[in-house]
Image: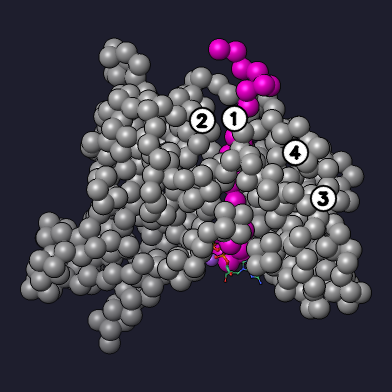
């Protein structure tokens, strides 16, 4: 079928920015959820995805002048949440690589920060357009929030005192963007959307500007990205996360951008020990407006079309690797071709994970978090000799115990967000293998450093 303007897919919108600028909170406000409250340490450590139907966007943008008159042609938005913590640059790059447009969140009280700059680099590298959410405007002194109106009127209605601070901080941010070679303007002062990226004042606490932000994303996507958003039958799908779910086994969270997936399809994807060939057992999405990374009641599909965030249950996904594309073999004789394609893509991805002869043993719940942890260890010059995704079992302790003979300071398992089996812990205690466990990456690092210092003392 021909690609047409009458058949657009949802734009994939990646939310990027420095830690704690309010990325998850913005999505919570839009979804009316409380995902951020449930995060360990209030920190996002995985990529998330939310399918937002167009009606929800219209509801959010009902106070936005001119939006109700706009002919909306996109079926919704697929929002991708990413972590802002420095150790998750792999997840930021993964998120940004699948997106059509981004929301770059900047804290108005802080301006551009290190991971804002890193995000800008990622966006520049792919030429991805973005809209800046200048968040936390409610923290401006004497600010009087009014979320039930267009943010332009909200801003106009502020006291002179609040307005002065708002203007000063906004201009500072514009200058900081200019220093990065980027033209940014407040959306209501944008002289030319081809030349200037728009910036929207927002507050995820009060809801101010949220409607304007969504309206701008829709408007920009429809007018500037039409070609890119024309639905295509050719499969384009990327694994975001690999995750064990009680009752479902190991599943993959996939961003299906173009094309369709069906129950029973033969899926080929990268695995730590070579390409995996498996049949789709179920295609699941959370309810609309719910986060894919949070445990939900799922909706099950026989067939599903892009763009959408979908969880796939199938056999043999335990060794699947996130961040790479999946293929479907329509005919049995296509399997070999798909395998070699996937193998090739995998080879370049795995070459980045190099194990040292001597080092700690690292385990994590998903490949995304494993990669982030390894990145953290690399920058801290902590070598690692073994990696695994999944709970700590006796076999892992045996492997880690090898270091007792070589370099006992590394007879350590760093376990991130995974269970430790009781008999594994007993064996570790017996052999003298240390297991450190945490659900925030840098806590693991702190524990290990303290332990090393203790050994030296
Ligand atoms: P990471 O995912 O860890 O990078 O953080 P994030 O960018 O998702 O920020 P998050 O949503 O976790 O918010 C960080 C903190 O800022 C939380 O305590 C939020 O309640 C608070 N916050 C977010 N947005 C606003 C806002 O607009 N105004 C105020 N006052 N606080 C906000
Ligand atoms: Na946070
Ligand atoms: Mg977050």
Give the residue drawn at x 28%, y 84%.
454
Q: Is residue 29 visible?
A: yes
Q: CA distance from mark 1 to mark 3?
A: 25 Å
Circle 4 — which element?
A: helix
Report if the CB atoms under discs 3 and 2 are less than 8 Å apart: no
Report if the CB atoms under discs 4 and 1 are less than 8 Å apart: no
Q: CA distance from mark 4 to mark 1?
A: 14 Å
Quadrant (top left/top right/bottom left/bottom right) for the N terminus? top right
Identify residue for label 2. Answer: 306
Magenta extent = 1-26
Identify residue for label 4. Answer: 219
N-term-proximal mark, 2 vs 1: 1
Figure quadrant of residue 98 = top right
Q: Is residue 243 left or right of residue 287?
A: left
Q: Is residue 396 left or right of residue 28?
A: left
Report if the CB atoms under discs 2 and 1 are less than 8 Å apart: yes
Identify residue for label 3. Answer: 187
Observer-side mark, 3 or 2, equals 2
Predominant secondary structure, magenta span: loop
Locate residue 68, reporting x and y percent: 78, 41
Circle 3 — which element?
A: helix
N-term-proximal mark, 3 vs 2: 3
Q: CA distance from mark 3 to mark 4?
A: 12 Å
Identify residue for label 1. Answer: 9
């Amino acid at each position: 079928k021909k690609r047409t303007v009458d058949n657009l897919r949802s734009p994939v919108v990646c939310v990027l920015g420095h830690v704690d600028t309010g990325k998850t909170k913005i999505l919570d406000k839009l979804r009316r959820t409380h995902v951020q409250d449930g995060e360990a340490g209030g920190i996002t450590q995985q990529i998330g995805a939310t399918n937002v139907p167009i009606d929800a966007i219209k509801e959010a943008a009902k106070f936005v002048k001119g939006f109700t008159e706009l002919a909306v042609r996109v079926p919704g938005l697929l929002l991708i949440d990413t972590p802002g913590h420095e150790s998750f640059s792999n997840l930021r790059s993964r998120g940004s690589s699948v997106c059509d447009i981004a929301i770059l969140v900047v804290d108005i009280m802080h301006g551009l920060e290190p991971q804002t700059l890193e995000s800008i680099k990622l966006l520049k590298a792919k030429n991805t357009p973005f809209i800046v959410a200048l968040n936390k405007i409610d923290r401006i002194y004497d600010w009087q929030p009014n979320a039930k109106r267009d943010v332009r009127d909200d801003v106009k209605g502020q006291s002179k005192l609040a307005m002065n601070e708002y203007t000063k901080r906004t201009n500072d941010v514009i200058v900081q963007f200019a220093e990065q070679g980027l033209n940014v303007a407040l959306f209501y002062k944008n002289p030319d959307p081809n030349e200037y990226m728009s910036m929207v004042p927002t507050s995820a606490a009060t809801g101010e500007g949220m409607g304007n932000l969504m309206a701008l994303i829709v408007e920009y996507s429809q007018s500037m990205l039409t070609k890119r958003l024309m639905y295509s039958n050719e499969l384009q799908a990327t694994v975001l996360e690999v995750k064990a779910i009680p009752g479902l086994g190991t599943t993959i969270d996939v961003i299906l951008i173009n094309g369709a997936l069906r129950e029973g399809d033969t899926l080929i994807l990268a695995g730590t020990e070579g390409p995996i060939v498996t049949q789709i057992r179920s295609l699941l999405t959370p309810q609309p407006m719910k986060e894919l990374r949070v445990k939900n009641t799922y909706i099950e599909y026989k067939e599903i079309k892009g763009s959408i965030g979908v969880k796939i249950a199938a056999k043999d996904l335990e060794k699947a690797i996130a961040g790479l594309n999946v293929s479907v073999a329509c005919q049995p004789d296509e399997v070999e071709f798909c395998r070699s394609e996937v193998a090739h893509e995998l080879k370049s991805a795995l070459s980045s994970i190099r194990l040292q002869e001597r080092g700690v043993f690292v385990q994590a719940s998903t490949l995304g978090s494993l990669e982030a942890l390894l990145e953290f260890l690399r920058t801290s010059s902590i070598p690692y000799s073994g990696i695994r995704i999944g709970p700590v079992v006796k076999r892992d302790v045996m492997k880690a115990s090898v270091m007792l003979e070589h370099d006992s300071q590394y007879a350590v398992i760093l376990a991130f967000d995974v269970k430790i089996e009781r008999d594994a812990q007993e064996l570790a205690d017996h052999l003298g293998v240390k297991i450190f466990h945490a659900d925030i990456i840098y806590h693991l690092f702190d524990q290990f450093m303290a332990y090393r210092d203790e050994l030296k003392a």
